[in-house]
Amino acid sequence: MLVFWIIAIVLLLIILALLLPALVRPNPAISVDANAEKRAIFRQQFAELEQDKADGVLDSAQYDMAKSELERRFLEEVGDTESTVVATSPDKRLAMVLLVVLPLVAGLLYYKLGSPVSISIPAVSPDITSQAKPDHSTMLSDWGPLLASLKKKLEVNPGDGAGWALLGRSYVELRQHANAIPAYEKAASIIKDDPQLLADYADALAVVNGHKLTGKPEELIMQALKLDPNHVKALMLAATVAFDRQDYKQAIVYWERLQRNLPADSEILPEIKASLNEARALTGEKVPAQPAAAIVTERSGVSGTVSISPKLISKLDPAATVFIFARAAQGQPMPLAIVRTTVSDLPYSYHLDDTNSIMPTNKLSQANEVILVARVSKTGDAKQQAGDLQGMSSVVKPNGMSVDIEIDQVLP
């Protein structure tokens, strides 16, 4: 923002430097011939007399008389003064008005027509949840004018499929999935060959429908896979659909295909492997033995069940998000590992280990003692807010022990 204003001020000073010198510098005197027009008329009349004499229209006596009369009139009307000097003084008052009015008008025009939000960068909060994800209210206030401007442009140009897709993704980022769906629908009707768009559309529909992927979302997922059989998000959603309907063999097919196309250092690869093992176990297949390192990680985590007090459950939306995380007992309140579910899944059996870490440099296995927190967020935001429901454990060691958590308090 500071750089923008410096550039604007420099450009304004350049404009003033070009205009003001011409207004304050004294102008040179200008010689003006006041009788030039009359002199030209008399020259023409003298020429006509000469022509009449030459043509025989006037004899010598008539010519001399007419010429004497014309010379007398010339001396009376023109005289021997051929020019006058005109000098102009600098307009310092206009210069002062421009010096004040030009910057003021420029500032007012920018305030009315410009977009300060588009060059503003929201400040990063020191809170860990702000580092992981911008605050919802801050994002809404920052993006509101931009989304309004985008919507106006799309009303003028409704055939802009990329614009509708951008609007839909922006609404999803603001967690306004219901508003995202019409935008995705228009984008998908224009752009027919974008698997990412179809997968995002399906995901938004599922969120609005209580995280259910059956029906229209599943149709969109299949269309995306038809366009790109190896599309990561479409494969993940397709595997989830198959798993939810207990078609575990089909879920294994999707997850195996996804596993083959992911890089070895992919962050979601451990989650895919865990889902594969669960699906194989449910089909009766023999689950491959875990490497020793994985077993150590499993034992170094913490497991348990999250439940909610019966007196609070009736007040909640079944689709409300539940965050379950572990944080260090001492030091920064940064989550070391986190998972999320919904109220409808409670009681929920959780397991936290290094595969659930937010940052590779800050793992659960590096902490000696932790506190486990289960929080119901009514807005879906990981940041703690008044009205959220929460339960906490005592200080425990993340050495494979089991810790149950009951959500039994309302945050002030």
Image: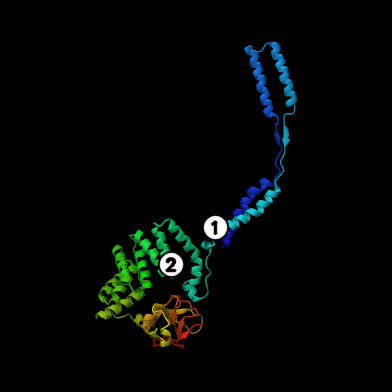
Q: Looking at the picture, how far across and down is residue 199, in whole percent?
A: 35, 67
Q: Residue visible at 67% across and 46% down?
A: 23
Mark 1, other Cα within 10 Å: few <14 / some 14–19 / many ≥20? few
- Residue, far left: 284
In-front residue for pair 370/95: 95
In-front residue for pair 231/213: 213
Q: Residue visible at 66% across and 49% down?
A: 20
Say which residue label 1 marks. Answer: 113
Q: Looking at the picture, how far across and down is residue 400, in whole percent?
A: 39, 86
**In which quadrant will I find the N terminus?**
bottom right
Q: Real-space Cα distance between discs 2 and 1?
A: 24 Å
Q: Residue visible at 49% across and 73% down?
A: 130
Say which residue label 2 marks. Answer: 171
Question: In the image, is 238 to the left or to the right of 183?
Answer: left
* Image vertical order of residue 338 relative to residue 152, above or below: below
On residue 194, the disc is: none
Q: Looking at the picture, how far across and down is residue 162, in whole percent?
A: 40, 59
Q: Earlier in the sequence, mark 2 or mark 1?
A: 1
* Image vertical order of residue 349 relative to residue 218, above or below: below
Q: What is the three-letter code of the residue carrying label 1?
A: Leu
Mark 2, other Cα within 10 Å: few <14 / some 14–19 / many ≥20? many
Q: What is the three-letter code of the residue carrying label 2?
A: Tyr
Question: In the image, is 103 to the left or to the right of 28?
Answer: left
Q: Looking at the picture, how far across and down is residue 408, in whole percent?
A: 45, 86
- Please report contact status of discs 2 and 1: CB closer than 8 Å, yes or no: no
* Image vertical order of residue 272 relative to residue 59, above or below: below
Q: Residue visible at 44% across and 66% down?
A: 170
Residue 224 quadrant: bottom left
